[in-house]
Image: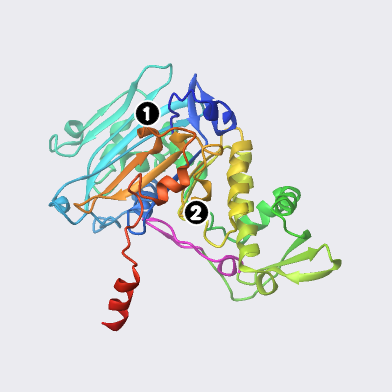
């Protein structure tokens, strides 16, 4: 999410959209646009899969098959899938990469920049030889690194196994992906909802009121439900979305109180709108993410939410110190260069060969800030829209068969 070198008047006025790390400007938010089936969700899924491999691969057994789908054209089912992520933990930059087939890890490496210069942690190549010594090259950061390698099968990422075996640098990065790189709004259990509510109740009420809700108070009380247990499942490809009803499943009693009659309570699950219920969970998530400078990944940020609420969420990230948001949307209301810089707006387009092309508005050097961005997008100036022949003649033909 490195910012481009943009000197336009609009960009200069959007200083809250970026923050600095070692004199490098980084974006707080990236928004992706594209037609249905263009590949927006696949980009989100790919990022989630990368993260979940780090978190879960240490638990894979010898029969494991990685839970992702390869690109089916151009013989890609016989080619490796490659993942690369550059990120910052505790002020230090890291580069991590791995490649795999459907049933085995092929390569893996980790480098970092402790004093501004690149330094190797480890490099792995499963095809470099038969022994672990031939397959791995180590720096000096991991204690007894070969012990970890001896316990790492070709179904498991070395980083994941090293964390499990209590190696410091690996544990630190594991916690980053587990606690800071947030893969979606939902997935909270009862205890998390209760803890977040107790921590952010005041901020939650203020957020709801800013979002034009007339809710002035909320209470949360745990109810013991004998014989009922619930766990939110996590797929290897990412977070499995669940509803608020699923998350608390009557184990939390959440009551809302409205301005019209502050003494009369409403049950959040049965008496509030779908939007209010979703906003409750979303705001708890976002307030925690912003307070702790985390990164949030969201597919279809506009689902069940009014555009003003979405803009409010974007503004919360603008007001944050270093929190970041990567999301997709179809809402063209935000294609506005007084709200987003050119390098914050990405387009996703399906090419003729079926693959997905991802590119930024910044790539269009001839598009001026004074032009109508929303209109240009809807007219197909940047490709990433469906081309539909919906003439009356065509539709009549379709209806009549």
Residue 210 makes an appearance in the image:
yes
What secondary structure is marked by label 1? loop
Q: Which residue is located at x 12 percent, y 35 percent?
A: 129
- Residue at x-position 83% and y-position 62%: 259
**Image point (33%, 74%), residue name:** 395
Crowding around mark 2 (Cα neighbors within 10 Å: few <14, some 14 to 19, many 20+) is some
- Marker disc for residue 218: none
Using the image, tell me which numbered label, if any, was put on residue 143. Answer: 1
Towards the viewer: 80 or 224:
80
Q: Is residue 92 left or right of residue 80?
A: right
Q: Residue at x 20, y 52 (%)?
A: 352
Where is residue 165 shown, x and y percent of the image? 39, 40
Determine contact: label 2, label 1, CB under 8 Å. no
- Does residue 103 appear to the left or right of 339 in the view shown? left
Could you tell me residue 88's position as x and y percent? 46, 30
276 versus 112 height, above or below: below
285 sits to left or right of 359: right
Q: In this view, which residue lies farthest toward the bottom?
A: 400
The region drawn magenta spans 232-248
Mark number for residue 331? 2
The mark lying in front, picked from 2 and 1, is 2
Magenta region includes residue 25: no
Residue nearest the viewer, comparing 263 with 231? 263
Q: CA distance from mark 2 to mark 1?
A: 50 Å
């Amino acid at each position: 999410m490195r910012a481009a070198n943009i000197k336009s008047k609009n960009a200069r006025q959007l200083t809250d959209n970026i923050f600095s790390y070692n004199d490098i400007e980084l974006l707080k938010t990236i928004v992706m646009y594209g037609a249905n089936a263009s590949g927006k969700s696949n980009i989100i899924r790919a990022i989630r899969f990368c993260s979940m491999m780090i978190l879960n691969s240490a638990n894979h057994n010898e029969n494991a098959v990685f839970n992702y789908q390869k690109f089916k054209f151009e013989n890609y089912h016989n080619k490796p899938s490659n993942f690369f992520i550059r990120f910052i933990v505790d002020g230090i930059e890291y580069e991590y990469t791995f490649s795999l087939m459907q049933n085995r890890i092929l390569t893996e490496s980790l480098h970092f920049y402790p004093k501004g210069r690149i330094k190797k942690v480890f490099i792995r190549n499963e095809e470099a030889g038969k022994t672990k010594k031939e397959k791995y090259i180590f720096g000096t950061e991991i204690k007894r690194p070969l012990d970890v390698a001896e316990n790492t099968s070709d179904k498991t990422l070395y980083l994941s196994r090293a964390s499990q075996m209590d190696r410091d640098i690996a544990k630190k990065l594991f916690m980053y992906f587990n606690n800071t790189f947030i893969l979606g709004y939902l997935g909270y259990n009862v205890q998390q909802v209760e803890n977040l509510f107790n921590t952010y109740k005041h901020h939650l009420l203020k957020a709801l009121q800013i979002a034009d809700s007339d809710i002035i108070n909320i209470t949360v009380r745990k109810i013991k439900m004998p014989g009922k247990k619930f766990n939110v499942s996590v797929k290897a490809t990412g977070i499995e979305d669940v509803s608020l009803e699923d998350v608390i499943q009557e184990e939390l009693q959440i009551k809302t109180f409205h301005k019209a009659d502050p003494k009369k309570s409403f049950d959040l699950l049965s008496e509030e709108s779908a939007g209010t219920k979703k906003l409750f969970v979303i705001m708890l998530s976002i307030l925690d993410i912003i307070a702790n400078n985390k990164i949030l990944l969201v597919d279809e940020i506009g689902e069940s939410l009014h555009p003003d609420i979405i803009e409010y969420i974007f503004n919360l990230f603008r007001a944050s110190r270093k929190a970041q948001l990567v999301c997709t949307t179809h809402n063209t209301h935000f294609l506005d260069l007084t709200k987003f810089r050119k390098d914050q707006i990405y387009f996703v387009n399906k090419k003729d060969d079926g693959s997905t092309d991802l590119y930024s508005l910044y790539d269009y050097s001839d598009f001026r800030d004074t032009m109508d961005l929303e209109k240009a997008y809807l007219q197909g100036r940047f490709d990433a829209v469906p081309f539909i022949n919906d003439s009356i003649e065509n539709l009549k033909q379709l209806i009549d068969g």
